[in-house]
Image (cartoon, helix red, strand yellow):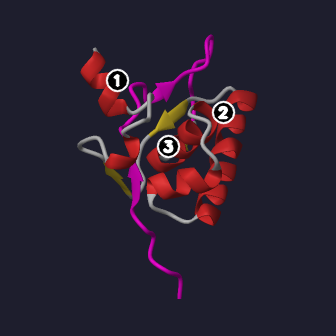
């Protein structure tokens, strides 16, 4: 019997949730990236955290981060190569409502950026 999915903690939902290829009629299903997969890509590739730091921030294991990152990269590549729409939604996630202590020195924390606007 499989273990139940652990709820993943993300900083905030993305500002843009749909990307359409230019000059495309956007027919078909397209590719759906989960909010948790988006957060893994954001933390690893944009914020430049290690997989261990990402896992601690999302309150999941490092091996789960690795699996999610591989899945996200595959989906993003499929959307780019096949010219499919990419939508970000869904997943078993909890969204932070306020800045957490571990984000105190984090310049890219979404709560800090919202206060600066």
Disc nearer the start of the sequence (2/3): 3
Q: Which residue is mark 2?
A: 79
Residue at image point 65% right, 36% down: 76
At mark 2, the secondary structure is helix
Q: Which residue is mark 3?
A: 39
Residue 22 drawn in magenta: yes
Q: Position of residue 99 (x, y in %)?
A: 29, 41
Alpha carbon separation for disc pair 2 and 1:
29 Å
| Image-based side of 100 in relation to 50, left or right | left
Q: Residue furthest front?
A: 105
- Is 77 drawn above or below residue 102 in the view shown? above
Q: Position of residue 51 (x, y in %)?
A: 63, 52
Q: Residues within 10 Å of mark 3 (few under 14, many from 20)?
A: many
The foreground one among 46 and 32 is 46
Q: Residue furthest bottom?
A: 1
The foreground one among 6 and 43 is 43
Residue 81's quadrant in the figure? top right
Alpha carbon separation for disc pair 1 and 3:
16 Å
- Is 20 drawn above or below residue 75 in the view shown? above
Q: Which residue is mark 1?
A: 113
Q: Which residues are magenta?
A: 1-29
Residue 50 drawn in magenta: no
Q: How many marks?
A: 3
């Amino acid at each position: 019997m499989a273990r139940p999915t652990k709820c993943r903690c993300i900083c905030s939902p993305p500002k843009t949730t749909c990307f359409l290829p230019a000059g495309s009629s956007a027919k078909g299903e397209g590719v759906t990236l989960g909010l948790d997969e988006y957060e893994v890509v954001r933390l690893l590739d944009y914020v430049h955290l290690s997989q261990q730091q990402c896992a601690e921030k999302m309150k999941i294991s490092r091996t789960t981060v690795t699996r999610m990152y591989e899945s996200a990269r595959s989906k993003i590549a499929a959307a780019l190569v096949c010219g499919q729409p990419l939508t970000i939604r869904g997943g078993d996630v909890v969204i932070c409502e306020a800045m957490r202590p571990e984000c105190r020195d984090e310049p890219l924390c979404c709560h800090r950026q919202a206060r600066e606007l």
